[in-house]
């Protein structure tokens, strides 16, 4: 997903983290949700590449991957927080 670029990846990952936090009703705060979104997008891309699953190389494909990764990471953070 090199076509998105680093700044685009941070913006899209942050937006995905914020949206995932809203959808999952997380109370970590907006900045923590954005950071978890960015980290979740990196983790999701790495996991998908490990299983040889390739997402379309576009902003929408990156957003979907980032959203799924952020949701998964927020879910794990919610379980660990309890």
Image (cartoon, grey):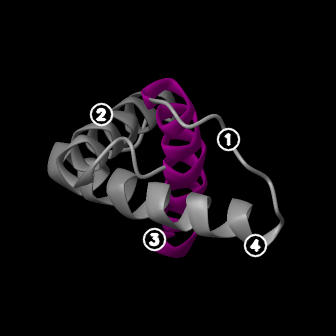
Which numbered tag is attached to residue 10? none
On the image, numbered disc 3 is attached to which residue? Answer: 81
| Residue 1 sits above or below residue 12 on the image | below
Residue 33 locus on image (x, y percent): 30, 49
Mark 1 touches mark 2? (CB < 8 Å): no
Q: Residues within 10 Å of mark 2 (few under 14, many from 20)?
A: many
Give the foreground label among 3 and 1: 1
Q: Earlier in the sequence, mark 4 or mark 2?
A: 2
Q: Which residue occupies the foreground of this view, 64 or 1?
A: 1
Q: Say which of marks 4 and 2 sits in front.
A: 4
Whether residue 7 is visible, yes or no, is yes
Q: Which mark is residue 50?
A: 4
Residue 44 x/y as whole percent = 59, 59
Spatial CA distance of label 2 from label 3 is 23 Å
The image position of residue 26, as x and y in percent, is 40, 43
> Which is more N-terminal, label 1 or label 3?
1
Q: Residue at x 47, y 54 (%)?
A: 41
The answer to whether the residue labelled 2 contacts the one labelled 3, judged by CB atoms less than 8 Å apart, is: no
Which structural element holds mark 1?
A: loop
Q: Position of residue 24 (x, y in %)?
A: 51, 35
Q: Residue 15: which disc?
A: 2
Q: Check disc 1 and report the residue beneath it.
A: 55
The residue nearer to you, when weighing 35 against 11, is 11
> Could you say whether the residue bearing mark 2 is in a helix, strand or loop?
helix
Labelled pair 4, 3 in contact (Cβ < 8 Å)? no
The local crowd at label 1, few if under 14, some if 14 to 19, many if 20 or more residues have their Cα within 10 Å, is some
Which residues make up the magenta segment?
59-82
In percent of the image, x 83 and y 66: which residue is there? 51
């Amino acid at each position: 997903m090199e076509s998105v670029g680093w700044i685009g990846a941070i913006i899209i990952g942050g937006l995905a983290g914020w949206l995932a936090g809203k959808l999952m009703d997380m109370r970590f705060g907006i900045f923590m949700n954005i950071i978890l979104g960015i980290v979740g997008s990196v983790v999701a891309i790495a996991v998908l590449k490990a299983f040889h699953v390739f997402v379309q190389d576009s902003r929408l494909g990156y957003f979907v991957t980032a959203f799924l990764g952020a949701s998964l990471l927020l879910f794990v953070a919610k379980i660990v927080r309890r």
